[in-house]
Amino acid sequence: MTRNKKLGVGALAAAALAGAIYFAVRANPELEVERRGGTLRAILRDEPTGFNRYLGPADNSKELLAQVLHDRLVRVNRATDALEPRLAERWTAEPDGVTHTISLRPGVTFSDGAPFTSADVLFAFEAVYSKAANSAIGTSLTIGGKPLEVTAPDAATVRIRFPSPFGPGVRVLDNLPILPRHKLEPALRNGTFKEAWGLTTPAAEMPGLGPFVIESYLPGRTLTLARNPRYWKKDDRGRQLPYLDRLEFQIVADMNVEILQLESGAVDLMFSDLRPEDYASLRRLEGQGRVRLVDAGISLDPPMFWFNLDPAAKASDPRRGWLQATDFRRALSHAIDREAIVKTLYLGAAVPAFGPVTPANQTWYVSDLPRYGYDPAAARARLFDLGLTDSNGDDLLEDKAGQPVRFSIVTNRGNTIRERTVAVMQEQFRKIGVTMDVVMLERGALIQRIISKDYDTVYFGTESTSRDPSSNLDFWTSSGGFHVWNMGQAKPATDWERRIDELMVQQVAASDLAERQRLFAEVQRIFAENIPVIYVTAPRVTVALGPRVLNATPAPIRPTVLWNSESLAVRPEGS
Amino acid sequence: MTRVGQALVVLWIAAGAFAPVLAPNPPAAQFEFPYAPPMRPRIIDADGHWRAPFVYGIRVRSLIERTYEIDTTRPVPLVWFSNGRFVSTADPSTPLLLLGSDAINRDVFARLLYGARASLGVAIVAGVCALLIGAIAGAAAGYAGGWIDDVVMRAADLLILLPAIYIVLALRAVMPLTLEFHQVFWLMAVILGLVGWPHVARPVRAIVASESRREYVEAARAVGAGPGRIVLRHLVPAAGHALITQATLLLPAFVLAEATLSFVGLGFPDPAASWGTMLLEAGRNVRAVSEYPWMLAPAVAIILFVLGLHLSAGDGRRGEPLTDTSLGAK
Amino acid sequence: MRSSLVRRIIRRLFFAVLLVLFVSSIAVVLARLAPGGIGEDLLTPPEVRARIRAEFELDRPLPVFYLHWLGRLVRFDLGTSFVYGRPVGELVRDRAANTALLASTALAIATLIGIPLGVLTASHRRGILPAVVRGASVVALSTPPILTALVMVLIASRTGWLPVGGMGTVWHLVIPALALAFPVGATLERLQAGATTETLRQPFMLAALARGVPRSLLVWRHSFRASLVPVLGIYGVIVGTIFSGSFAVEIVTNWPGLGRLMLDALFARDVHLVAGCAVAGSFFLAVGTLAADVALSLVDPRLGEST
């Protein structure tokens, strides 16, 4: 009896211990996380177009590869939005508000053993500002069209002078990957920069500072990267990063193939986040343990439904009286049942959106802005006030001239969720008597229409990579190239746009974060009232991972997972 | 077999023609249930009692996983010939979804019927164009030989190789932004017909060239038959087999090409239904298809239609399709 | 007859060159006329866009652009791809080899399956097997390759029997080659069946049968001869069809071929690359039709007389 009791107690204790160990292991994923070695198999959507990140505008593959092959002075943590030191060990702002002194991390070398010095930083700026590069990075590193002034007092120090006060400060340096001067400088000097680091350049000629280096490339098939043995970063316990031996990219153009490969275990990581239409079926796969779905939070870039507000573009259009009226847009916003769209099209994996800044952008989001939410009665009232009534009894509205209230929306074929959202809005607008003709164009043709301002309205979206409004001036200011509803204005067409321009100038120059937030909240309020762009939904970004992937911290910005490739790890194959 | 084939073809054409009556719901109507499974009309209820034809409504089990269950507590009777529709349900909140619903809650069956109008219409008009031009051009090339042959066949090669997408893109750019259904219809039919004829002309030319040196043609020529008569009476029929085979290949290709055209901006305007765009939508998400197999209904429809076409072109007497018009026609 | 064949081949080669010139010229002109252009993206700053246009001479008038392109073409220079920044010739060569591998495998499978099955269905009217083959081939004819490929890819991912997409081992070739081969094989089966039936009805066949020659021997030997003309006649088209049909299959199965390259180039408005792909395509078609033609005139010398 006693013996039995003892046995029982012993068994209980053993069970408790086992349980404790089990939970300790589970609760402390680091035990697994720090597993070194192994190959992570990921996907590139597009064939790489070259390995010289300084050249030309960005494309998906270029941006992703720059993240894993190169490093930068500072990094904005994609998940937390915090500024982290990378190649810069520390930095100080001078009292003049425009100069920053940056101390470089000592002892850092490129993967070929050459030391990293301030000369590399100077070269990086020179390259992206050069005509030969025609780089979008160069454009992003200008303030009001003027470049930064960069000097190097010594090999370990860089001094950066902004042309005018700039609130975000050294954050913008996140845009600039540092490539090796000793390999690229000759090309820049002798005019062959455009051909430098093409797809046929031997891998040994392309060293980097990033966690991985190119090992081999089979055009159209795979790009294999290997660990950079000289990578500067160590983990908390002083172990050399990255954990992975290899990062292997398969070039997969089709999203179907990508998902099926993930399902069959041929790859561990998808290139992009999950489309809402794949969500339900991947949830079921998750139930079978074949994938893991991680919610990376709400997207930072909600798709936009905007109106052509250029007065010149619609000058001879008899509909301009109501088509460009603010109340017309408010009425349509009232007519959109965003909850229904979230429920049926996104299966709940989205939130209704009322502005360009989503709740995911914690630093800049303002919750108490004016919104024109679902309210068909209010929609009808506003349309009535505009003189739009059903004069002939066909359940559809006509304007004062008796012409039907009818406009077109252009979107691109191929983006399923956008196509569906437009189809649902078309039906919702029909219920308040407004006819919206849906026109699907191929992407290039659509962009051509937007640039030439030849459309009524557009439903489209792009992805920016920054949360800070001063990096999105091309959207906010009236002269901007991405001020979509009326791009590149010589001088602001409306008073409210003029006001936003002024506020943004102050916002960019202010150095105090609270002051910048206050100014930007005012911008958002003006924007919400005038509603040049109607927002419908902000999807939740969901990332699907293979079961082998460890230590992923997905972010709602691309690349969702590989932005911190150095600390990713995998379970050994077959475990 | 021929009868079966003809029945299939007639059935589809009738389905398209009478879509407004046959479809239980309007093709653009959006209901409450995305990817709802097909409903089965029943006459025996869950308790084993017989009753007039009815369906059970569905209710959502999990929206996030898009699973539904049958609501056996709520039988909804079917009504016949009401509101100008052949059959529908008595309760508008429970629509009759014979083939389930698509991603934005529309009736797949209704869209299939309406899609038959658009897709079969375009494919048939374009197919007839392609066959006519192809047969004439191919026969002319094969019979006349020489420079006519060269010019016609090189033109055919050219058309097969042209990046037609650019033509469509350029064409689309100069057209008005919004296009009406009938404009899209005729434009598509013409484009597809023009792109399709070389595929017909090649085999016809080969057969005609070979046949025109045969004894019976020489004989016809000897008795004074003109070239027109020889080509029409003897040579084109000799190529009949190849014509039908090519038609069978062209029709499904045209239905799909219509989806490609819609990709470059020349599609039927929403919310009009077409088989091509329905298929495109299914093809874009293979995983979804495996879970909602009714999304493949347009593929089955295309296959059934072409099958019918093929069978009805056959020769019922011998049970072997397509041989009566084959090579050595008399 | 020999010399006429040689003359014929030379003639065809001349036309093939003309075809390449024509197709690629039209591709260049149309690509310039189509809306949109390289580097046109909303997030690309306007000044970067303008510089890209200048760099690729897209700001020049179309005739000037075209003449420059033509000038390079006669020196066998296909220009540089805007997107990849690499010579078009190189890019196209790699991918064309992959497509050729895929297409020839598909063609071989289609021939090996289609021709014998055609003889089978025509010579055995009754029985389950011929009926099944007939039905299957009509279904295969009516199913676009992209659907077949999609279904096979789905099955492969579920069962793990075959790799899903990509290129590497022989197994990667199975799905795209089969998807392309099915409709072609069915076409050949139907043509062969028609020809065989026709042969069986010829008086000399009946006479031979009456003499006691085994039926199966007659069928196999003579039906091949009879079917050669229509089958070879259609081979020329098939080469073109496989080339144009392969792009859908290449995308679904992630095969790094010419079709995928061309589609990417089309949508990126990579003018030189599109023209380069068109050159490769016309080369394939020219070789295919030429080979079919030569074979045709060897089989049926009467055809050679015409030209």
Image: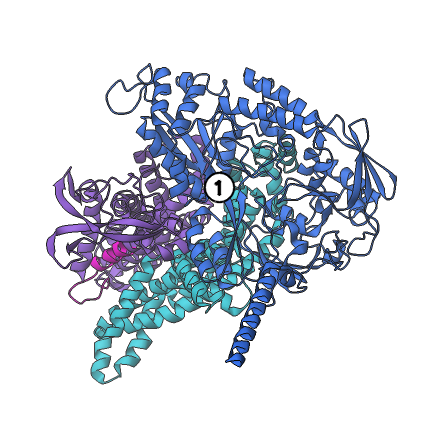
Chain colours: A blue, B purple, C cyan
Range of magenta residues: B303-323
Residue B226 at x, y = what percent?
A: 24, 50
> Relative to residue B149, is residue B272 depicted above or below?
above
Residue matched to label 1: A539
Location of the C terminus of chain A by quadrant is bottom right
Question: Is residue A285 part of the magenta span, yes or no?
Answer: no
Front-most of residues A128 and B8 = A128
- In the displayed structure, A573 sits above or below B180; it is below
Which of C282/A389 is in front? A389
Query: Is A520 on the left or on the right of B321, as rendered?
Result: right
Is residue C170 toward the left or the right of residue A87 in the image? left
Q: Chain of mark 1?
A: A
Label 1 sits on what residue type? Answer: Pro
Residue C120 higher or lower than C59, as above or below = below
Would residue C169 appear left or right of A208 to someone viewing this image? Answer: left
Q: Position of residue C123 (x, y in %)?
A: 25, 74
The answer to whether residue B264 is seen in the rendering is: no
SS for callout 1: strand
- The crowding category of the residue bearing disc 1, from other C-alpha atoms within 10 Å (few below 14, some 14 to 19, many at least 20), is many
Q: Quadrant of residue B271?
A: top left
For the point 44% across and 51% down, the residue is A278
Residue that appears at 22% across and 40% down: B92
| Residue at 48% over, 56% down | A259
Q: Which of the pair A1/A100 is nearer the observer?
A: A1
Residue C192 lies in quadrant? bottom left
Q: Is residue A148 left or right of residue B144?
A: right
